[in-house]
Amino acid sequence: MSTADMTAPAAHATVEAAVRAQMSKALGGKRGIVEAAVPTIAFTGTWMATQDLKTSLIVGIASAVALLVVRIAQRTTPQFVLNSLVGIGIGAFFAARTGDAKDVFLPGILYNGAYAAGMLLSIVVRWPIVGFLIGSVTGDPTAWHNEPALVRLCARLTWLLMLPCLLRVVVQLPLYLADHVTALGVSKIVLGWPLQVAGLAAMVWVLARGRTPIEPPAQPSV
């Protein structure tokens, strides 16, 4: 075992600190959040101005590519820009095949619906997804499940992680069915990083109230 592996659990003394660190990493910080929103803003703004699907798709994809070039030039991780580029690319594929601008947003609606369903299922079967964040820190992916208090904490956090996804589907699906492309774009922006930050703030509030110690996995006796 490497020194990094041995010290990883010690980097976070509590479950709450570990989950906060993992969530921050997953969001990519302020820059990652902004980069995720830019292609949608570019597509929606162009659509509002031109009502032209092809032009809007080109502008949306070009904005993501420009962000990627900046990341590469700065030699920083392009992970979050690539996620954004893949997202707008899949949406563009759907819309190009149907010729309907609203289909740019269909993959996101389906993704959020599937993600919410998966998280709800994990709560119902008492293996909440957030628990595996703890497992990734302790080095044992399932040991947390032996502690009822941890399972309850992870269930609450998974609910807070799920609600933004569910809200996006509840708001955007009717707009999609009603062919409101501009409203879809605006809702995707408003329910994107602002809602994610609100959800993160709620999770941080829950985490700030507790100090559940991380127990490293037991070492086998020699």
Image (cartoon, rainbow, N blue to C red):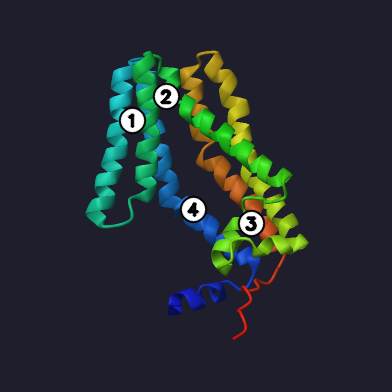
Give, as a three-letter code, the residue at label 4: Ala
The percent coordinates of residue 221 (x first, y second) are 62, 84
Around disc 3, counting alpha carbons within 10 Å, would you say few (fewer than 14), some (14 to 19), or many (20 or more)?
Answer: many
Left or right: 203 in relation to 124: left
Q: Amino acid at mark 2?
A: Val
Task: Identify the mark nearer the N-term, 4 or 3.
Answer: 4
**Residue carrying label 2:** 104
**Cα distance in 3D space between marks 2 and 3:** 33 Å
Q: Are marks 3 and 1 in contact (CB under 8 Å)?
A: no
- Marks 4 and 3, how far apart at CA: 15 Å
Confirm whether residue 45 shows in the render.
Answer: no
Sequence-first tag of 1 and 4: 4
Given this view, does label 4 or label 3 mark the residue nearer the observer?
A: 3
- Say which element carries label 4: helix
3D distance between C-alphas at marks 3 and 1? 36 Å
Mark 1 = which residue? 60
Crowding around mark 1 (Cα neighbors within 10 Å: few <14, some 14 to 19, many 20+) is many
Earlier in the chain: of badge 1 and badge 2, it is 1
Residue at x-position 35% and y-position 17%: 97
Within 10 Å of disc 2 (Cα), the crowding (few <14, some 14-19, many 20+) is many
Q: Which residue is mark 3?
A: 131
